Image (cartoon, helix red, strand yellow):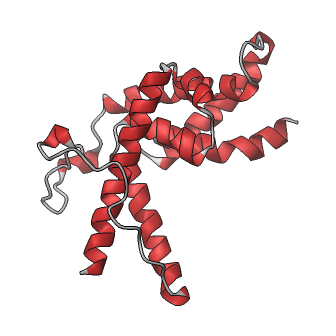
Amino acid sequence: MFAALLDTWSRGMLRLARSYVSTSDSAEEVVQDTWLAVIRGIDGFEGRSSVKTWVYRILVNTAKKRGARESRTVPWSSAFERDGDPPLDGVGAADGRAPLPPAWKDLPAAWSVPEGEILASEVRGRIGAALAELPARQRSVITLRDLEGCSSEEVCAILDISPANQRVLLHRARTAVRKRLEDYFEAMRR
């Protein structure tokens, strides 16, 4: 039973943990620490939520602690400039631009098979980059809802947020990702 849960949930847990910590290695450690906490605390599980919600709540708490600890340290690599690019601001009204449209301007064109694989890989990379730029709470909500397939109620329980807040965070996250992809597809058409 435990091995099945481990196989089924670990990839999703890793994606969610990655939204709180700075490296993939840290995310893997968070997932390991979560499973250890689950094993130690299984006798304390009261059944007031699903097992998945309980495990993911432990994951979020563990990842938040680790992320906070990491944010108090400055990595050596940050002492050096990278490409001289300024940091990216948020998307939408916060950076002074007009609010984003509620849907795609134009649907992306279908790709031919040979170049489709390469372009699909590039788009996956763009989606990953867009997700990485989101604020942590938006990234967590979109990861749980769209990548993990959690219900709205599960997301609210895991992240301890209200349904209204969950909807707002999900909308903002989807809009930001869609905007980044629209910019990419528009540049490809030129």
The answer to which image quadrant residue 107 occupies is: bottom left
Q: Which residue lies at the image location 47% right of the left edge and 36% below the top edge?
A: 140
Q: Which residue lies at the image location 58% right of the left edge and 44% below the top edge?
A: 14
Establish if 23 lies above or below 136: below
The quarter in which the C terminus is drawn is bottom left
Residue 183, percent from left and from top: 27, 64
Establish if 19 lies above or below 44: below
The foreground one among 102 and 8 is 102
Residue 178, percent from left and from top: 37, 55
Q: Which residue lies at the image location 27% right of the left edge and 50% below the top edge?
A: 77
Apparent side of residue 149 relative to residue 101 in the rendered image (left or right): right
Q: Is residue 21 visible?
A: no
How many tags in the picture? 0
The foreground one among 100 and 56 is 100
The quarter in which the N terminus is drawn is top right
Apparent side of residue 79 relative to residue 112 in the rendered image (left or right): left
Establish if 66 lies above or below 48: below
Residue 2, percent from left and from top: 83, 35
Q: Is residue 78 visible?
A: yes
Q: Which residue lies at the image location 37% right of the left edge and 59% below the top edge?
A: 104
Residue 134, percent from left and from top: 35, 43
